[in-house]
Amino acid sequence: MSGIPAIAVLVSGSGSNLQAIIDASERGEIPCRVGIVISNKADAYGLVRAAKHGIPTEVVSHKEYPTREEFDARLVDIIRRSGAELVCLAGFMRVLTPVFVRAFPNRILNIHPALLPSFPGTHGPRQALDYGVKFSGCTVHFLDEGVDTGPIIVQAVVPVYDDDTEEALAARILKQEHRIYAMAIRLYFRGRLGRKGRRVLADGETKIPEFFHRNPDA
Ligand code: GRF
């Protein structure tokens, strides 16, 4: 294929983040192409999205592997053979073991629908509503061996309204996920992501101005 680097995207469901990444790639906004899409679920709509863009797909059902490690080893094998330089988890609903994480050090990104370290794990929007925070958002981070604990690359903030349902808040967050995932991939390929301990520093990127938002805006 072309000389542009390939990424592997792992999905379990709708794949709207995958779509945002494909679109950003086709528009030339990120310097890479989606080389393979892998799902643990055969009916994931993300597979249909990939096929519509002529992107190769693989289904690896976790149910066919006796241990998480064996499942992960199979994923590693497929990704290595695809030649992908970066792995993007986009709504991939399996916890990955060190077998996977250590195979691609600092080369796996994940997106989470909350402002980490708040509300890790499943149901980020519901946890935010139940807790009663006035702002939530989303986070793209490097994967480490914990659940949603890796170094943070980009975050975006959204307000939480009094009349929000879980679905309404999740939709507001998802819209921002689509923007920041492509952004994080762009930063990654620019090779500008410096590290200072846990802090990921986007050298040379514009700083947003200091701001003050309050919610409610009374
Ligand atoms: C997103 O909210 C993502 O943050 C979470 O799962 C959801 C996946 O959505 N990990 P989609 O499949 O990309 O539409």
Image (tube, grey):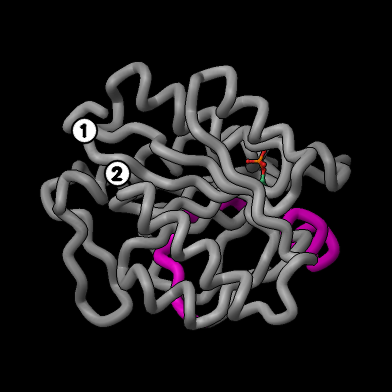
N-terminal label among 2 and 1? 1
For the point 24% across and 33% down, the residue is 31
Is 161 displayed left or right of 111 in the figure? right
Badge 1: residue crowd in 10 Å (few <14, some 14–19, many ≥20) = few
Q: Residue drawn at (56%, 38%), measured in percent from left and top?
A: 57
Q: Residue furthest left?
A: 204
Q: Is residue 189 above or below residue 1?
A: below
Q: How many marks?
A: 2
Which residue matches tag 1?
Answer: 4
> Which residue lies under the disc numbered 2?
209
Residue 196 x/y as whole percent: 20, 76
Ligand 1 within 8 Å of disc 1? The answer is: no
Residue 3: horizontal and vertical position, in percent?
17, 32
Reply above or below: 97 against 1. Answer: below
Give the residues drawn in magenta, as a range. Answer: 124-145
Left or right, 152 with respect to 167, comes to left
| Distance from Cα at disc 2 to Cα at disc 1 | 34 Å
Q: Is residue 211 visible?
A: yes
Is residue 215 in view?
no
Task: Give the quadrant of residue 62.
Answer: bottom right
Instruction: State if disc 1 and disc 2 touch (CB < 8 Å).
Output: no
Task: Residue 114: give x, y in percent of width and height.
Answer: 62, 58
Query: Where's the N terminus, which quadrant?
Result: top left
Circle 2 SS class? loop
Residue in the foreground of this view, choosing between 44 and 81:
81
Residue lying at 33% horizontally and 62% vertically, measured from the top left: 107
Disc 1 element: loop
Return the residue nearer the eye: 144 or 55: 55
Residue at x-position 69% and y-position 54%: 40
Q: Is residue 148 left or right of residue 83?
A: right
Percent position (x, y) of residue 149? 51, 76
Identity of the amino acid at label 1? Answer: Ile
